[in-house]
Image (spheres, rainbow, N blue to C red):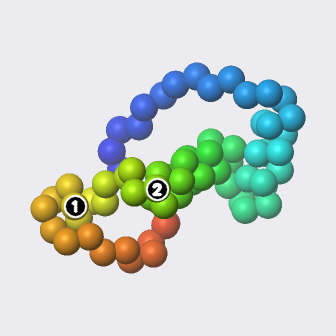
Amino acid sequence: MGNKKNFVLRLQPEVYDALERWATDEFRSVNGQMEYLLHQALKSSGRLPSRAKENGQPMQDTGDEAEY
């Protein structure tokens, strides 16, 4: 796994509480849940380059979401 960037994010308490409940339901940390949701949103909008595309190979969706 490569290096990850750190940054501060301010959320309304009710948003954080809802996110925390959702993360717990899916057996993730709040940070892991936020990373998963952002990854899914970027992927579905076509804004996230795949690793294969970065290496000059054709894109293939393996469905492997194990990192998130």
Query: As drawn, is 10 to the left or to the right of 59?
Result: right
x, y (%) of residue 10? 68, 23
- Residue drawn at the location 73% of the way across and 62% of the way down: 26
In the rendered image of this protein, does residue 16 appear above or below residue 35? above
Relative vertical location of residue 25 with respect to residue 60 in this rendering, above or below = above
Q: Residue furthest left?
A: 56
Which residue is disc 1 drawn over?
A: 53
Determine whether the residue tagged by mark 2 lies in a helix, strand or loop.
loop
**Badge 1 density bin: few <14, some 14–19, many ≥20, Cα 10 Å:** few
- Residue 40 makes an appearance in the image: yes
Give the farthest residue toward the front: 45
Contact? badges 1 and 2 (CB < 8 Å): no
Q: Is residue 32 visible?
A: no
Q: Which one is nearer the viewer's eye here, 64 or 43?
A: 43
The x, y position of residue 51, in whole percent, is 27, 59
Amino acid type of the residue tagged 1 in the rendering: Lys
**Image position of 13 (left or right of 37):** right
- The residue under label 2 is 45
Residue at 62 percent of width and 45 percent of height? 34
Quadrant in the picture for residue 36: bottom right
Q: Given this view, does label 1 or label 2 mark the residue nearer the observer?
A: 2
Q: Which residue is drawn at 44% across and 72% down?
A: 64
Work out whether mark 1 precedes mark 2 in sequence or the reverse, and give the earlier one. Answer: 2
- Residue 51 is left or right of residue 19, and the answer is left
Residue 7 at x, y percent in the picture:
52, 25
CA separation in Å, label 1 and label 2: 16 Å
Residue type pointed to by label 2: Ser
* Classed neighbour count for the residue bearing mark 2: other residues with Cα under 10 Å, few (<14), some (14–19), many (≥20): few
Which residue lies at the image location 45% right of the left edge and 75% below the top edge? Answer: 63
- Which quadrant of the structure image shows residue 62? bottom left
Q: What element carries label 1?
A: helix
